[in-house]
Amino acid sequence: MSRDAPPALEPLPRSLEDRRRLVAERGLELRLLLDEAFTAFCDRRDLHPYGFRGEDPITEAVEWAIDFFASERFQPEKQPVKTLRLFTCVDNWLHLKVGQQAHGARKGWRAADLEPETLAASAVSHLRRAQDVALAETRARLGHTLGVLKARTCAGVVLLWLEGSQRLRAKVFDWDEPVEVRDDGDSKKTRSFRRHDALFRYLCLFIGIVDDASAEDAHRAVVRTSFSPCEDRPPYRVLEATPGTARKLQGLRKRGIRDLLERALDAAEADAVTPEEHLTRLLLRHGLNPTTAHALKLQDEPLLTRLSALPPPEVRR
């Protein structure tokens, strides 16, 4: 998991090995989240119908959820929430315990609730709730990532990102605030390139592809130059002092940037199923286009072809 993500927004581990490692390293934290959620549930309902019939049904439910999460039966890709906030979603754990229809019966559904018209209306309502949750979570991630970007670059890069993302933020995330446009004496073309570079750096942090622990020289060169605190003036990145070192680093950095752009494109081209995935893909398709490659000084025809082929972002607000 990224060290830059707040706990509730950390992505669920996909592999069985990673889930078991998470339980081993942070089991107490996960149990506390579950305990609080199940305790609140028990203020309104009983856990007995769900098979938790011991002297301490809350602890029994918590341990069952932890064991299920660390088992092969858990399918992270099918969960409605793809972050650690899932550990606060009691209804989902009870659904996993007894199945959706049985869970509904235990909550007191009537026979009419299973009619097709009712189920359709319920599905629409559930989808809207899921979209609202995804929007709130993504908005929180946007703000958090912006803080990470500032800590790893400078205020100028933050302002460039705010300028480049202003219309999308206002239209999709209701995040509209005045942006201080600096006059660096740049031409319109140079200013556009700087905005696209800032958008790209932000997206790399947002989707978690910047790895401080990487052993790859090319990736480390990018981290060193583009994702480290720098002077708050153009070119808004760390520069090497000696020409010989600078030339070597420039070649490594170019390879590292190409790799990051390919990975960002992979994410932008991927199918989106959940509301969270749709919003992430929207951000990626907004921030990636042929100008990105020019801003990053990559003359790479396959990359330009992929960037040109990206569909425009679909704003559904």
Image (cartoon, rainbow, N blue to C red):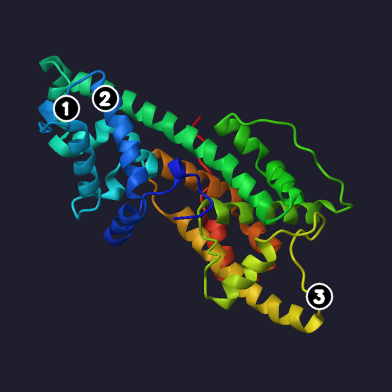
Residue 254: % across, % down = 64, 73
Q: Residue at x 44, y 35 (%)?
A: 134
Residue 73, compared with residue 178, is above or below; it is below
Which residue is nearer to you in this view: 9 or 31?
Answer: 31
Residue 261, compared with residue 27, is above or below; it is below
From the viewer's perspective, tell me whether residue 205 is left or right of residue 299: left
Marks 1 and 2, how far apart in space? 8 Å
Residue 86: % across, % down = 34, 39
Q: Which residue is mark 1?
A: 47
- Badge 2 marks a residue whose secondary structure is helix
Q: Residue at x 22, y 49 (%)?
A: 74
State which tag comes first along the sequence, 3 or 1: 1
Residue type pointed to by label 3: Ala
Structural crowding at the residue carrying mark 2, measured as other residues with C-alpha within 10 Å and reported as few (<14), some (14–19) or many (≥20): some
State which tag comes first along the sequence, 3 or 2: 2
Q: Which residue is mark 3?
A: 241
Q: Are marks 1 and 2 in contact (CB under 8 Å)?
A: yes
Marks 3 and 2, how far apart in space? 60 Å
Q: Which residue is mark 2?
A: 41
Residue farthest toward the right in the current orientation of the protein: 185
Residue 66, compared with residue 169, is above or below; it is below
- Badge 3 marks a residue whose secondary structure is loop
Which residue is nearer to you in this view: 124 or 182?
Answer: 182
Which residue is nearer to you in this view: 166 or 83?
Answer: 83
Residue type pointed to by label 1: Leu
